[in-house]
Every structure is written in structure tokens, then in C-alpha cells.
Amino acid sequence: MLRRIVPLLITLLILGAFSWTLYFLYEKSKPKPTAFETTLARRLNIVKKTVAPGAIVPRREVTIKPRVSGVIQKLHVQPGDYVKDKALIAKIRIIPNAVSLNNAEAAVRTARINQANAATELERFRNLFDQGLLSEADYNQKKLVSDLRQQELDTAQSNLQLVREGASQRSGAVSNLVYSTVEGMVLEVPVKEGGSVIEANNFNEGTTIASIADMNDLVFNGKVDESEVGKLKEGMKVSIAIGALGERRFSGVLEYIAPKGIASEGTIQFEVRARIDIATDVFIRANYSANADIILERKDQVLAVPEGIVEYQGDKAFVEVEVGPQTFEKREVKLGLSDGIDVEVLSGIDEQMKLKVPAGTKL
């Protein structure tokens, strides 16, 4: 009897273990129900904006150029100096052109010979006039000729001095001294003492000796893609972030939109300019890189939900509202302004409703 019971028990145990294993594997293979996260609609400020990269530049930057060619003899300013209008910037030592110098010296010699001859003639006619052998009209005519020859000599000597030194004692003009034409800060001095400079004329823009600008009147210069420029208009508010100054932002107003676009890296971009409200406690340097957030539209404290939980079907939008534990129902909502992260909800839900967050969506 015992011999029959033992094998039967062993068989039953094996069958039981096998059945339990099959059940365990079946339960493990069954998909677990997904527990969806939920969120609530919130009151937010929705700001729709476009970003324009660019730089901070002075509204007016003036380049100072010489009126004569030569070598920089002395520089009186350096970058960072504040100068007044007509302040001395540099002195130039003139290296006269050989041909011009030779012509000027020849003109002086010719004028001196003519003046000496006229003076001799005048002295002879003065003796005749004193003896009553010459009329006063003829004497005055000879005196006029002598005065003209003296004037020609003075002019030739002045021209020679200008060619040699860039200055004329008679006129008081000093062309080899370079003066500032505006008041402001010296931003750049691209030349050094001993370096050659070229005068500005009809055929050459000349060598820049210094750049001067008013650093209290700065503007943002940037570029906007053609897909955004149609939404812009002058007078829009601008928030400007300057990379060198960290998270601090400056307010401004858009004051210029270029009427013509420029091709850049396969796209058309339009130049924009915005006035900046400069704080008194910070010094902004020229050509700081910056980004301007141009505010296209803004709504404050409106009911909004994350864009990621909205499902679009054609021209309609839906969200899923929790109606029971992990049970959701689709609700159509009417949407308003969006900033790409959150979107305004005009109708369809309220602040108390729990909204389904689709799997894989990060809020």
C-alpha cells in the first residue's frame, strides 16, 4: 500500500509545481496597467515673442581721419578716454611730396624775382612822379602792379610752408593737427606713433586715427528671420539680454525695421534696431553680443495648460479629463495664445479638473 501512495504523491507534487510555474509565468507576462500622471490647469503669463540675435552698438560712432598724409608724430588720446568736441587727437609730421615741394620752391623763386623787378620799377616811377614828370594815375598803376607781385610772393611762401609743415603762419590754419569733431568716448585708436597715415580725399577714404562715440546713447542692432518680420512693428517692447552681464535684462523699444532683407546662409534676414533703457549702475561696452526678445503678444494670469497634453484633430483641440481613478474622458477645449510651452485655454475645462499627462511627456 505504501509503495503505491509514495509514487502517487510524488507525481501529484510534480504536477502541482508544473501548474504553479505555468500560472506564475502567465501572470508575469500579463501587461501591467499604466498609471498616468495628471496635472491641473494654472494661471500663467503667456508671452509670445521672437528672438533676434545681435549686438549693442552706439547710435552714432564717428571715425576721425587726417586732412594730410604723413607720419603720426604724437597721439594725445587712447581708448577709453573721454574727449570734448575739437579736442586734439594727434599731430602728424608731414613727409612732403618731392614734386609738390619742388614746384612750391620754384613758385617762390619766380614770385620773388617778379616782386623785386616790380619794386625796382616802382622806385623809378616814384622818382619821376616826385619830379612831376609822371601823372598820378600812371604812378598808381605801377604801385598796384608792385602790390600784386608782393601778394603773389606771400602766397607762394605760404604754399611752400603748407607743403613742408602742413601749417601756414599767415592763415593760422594747421592741417597737420587732428581734432575731434564730436564729444564722446574714444573707442578705438587703430594707429600707433610712427605709423603712416593717408589723408581723406575724393579717391581715398583715408586712414582712421580714432573712433569716437556717445556711450550714453546705445542701441541694439540685430537680425530677424523673414518668417517673423511680418509680425513686427515699430513701438513694440523689447527685452534685451547681454551675454557678458549674465541673467540681467534691459528693456527697450523697437524703433526700426529694415525695408529690405539680406541673404544670409540660405535665408533672408531683416535688420532691426531697438532703443535701450540703460541703467545708471552698469557700464555697457560697445559690441557686446546680445539677444532681444521682441514681444509680439502678451496675456497675464490666464488659464493655461502645457502644450504637451493637448491633442489636435484637424482644427479642434482636446484634453483628457479624469472622471474616475485612472479613467479619462476626452474634452474639447478652445485655445488662445501660445508661447510654445504653455497655451491659453479659453473654454472647456476649469482649474479643478485633473488632466491626463500622456506617457513620455515631460512637463
Image (cartoon, grey):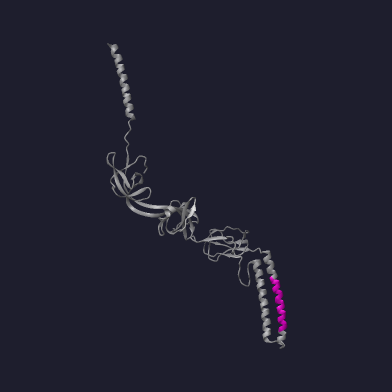
116 part of magenta stretch: yes
Across and down, in percent, residue 137 comes to: 67, 85
* Residue in the foreground of this view, choosing between 333 and 78: 333
On-image quarter of the N terminus: top left
The magenta span reads 107-125
Q: Is 289 on the left-hand or right-hand side of 196? A: left
Foreground pick, 282 / 343: 343
- The answer to whether residue 177 of the structure is visible from this angle is yes
Q: Position of residue 318 (x, y in %)?
A: 31, 45
Left or right position of 53 against 342:
right
Could you say where residue 341 lies in the image, as x and y percent from the top left? 37, 47
Name above or below for residue 140 compared with residue 171: below
Q: Quadrant of residue 147?
A: bottom right
Please identify the residue farthest to the bottom as the structure is shown.
132
Residue 152 at x, y percent in the picture: 66, 74
Please tell me whether residue 200 is drawn above or below residue 297 in the rendered image: below
* Viewer-side residue, 108 vs 319: 319
The residue lying at 40 percent from left, 53 percent from top is 49
Q: Is residue 55 left or right of residue 48?
A: right
**Relative to 315, is 5 above or below?**
above
Q: Quadrant of the C terminus?
A: top left
Number of marks in picture: 0
Q: For the view shown, which residue lies furthest in the front direction?
A: 314
* Magenta stretch, overall SS: helix
Q: Is residue 330 magenta?
A: no
Residue 290 appears in the picture as rendered: no
The residue sitting at 70% across, 73% down in the picture is: 110
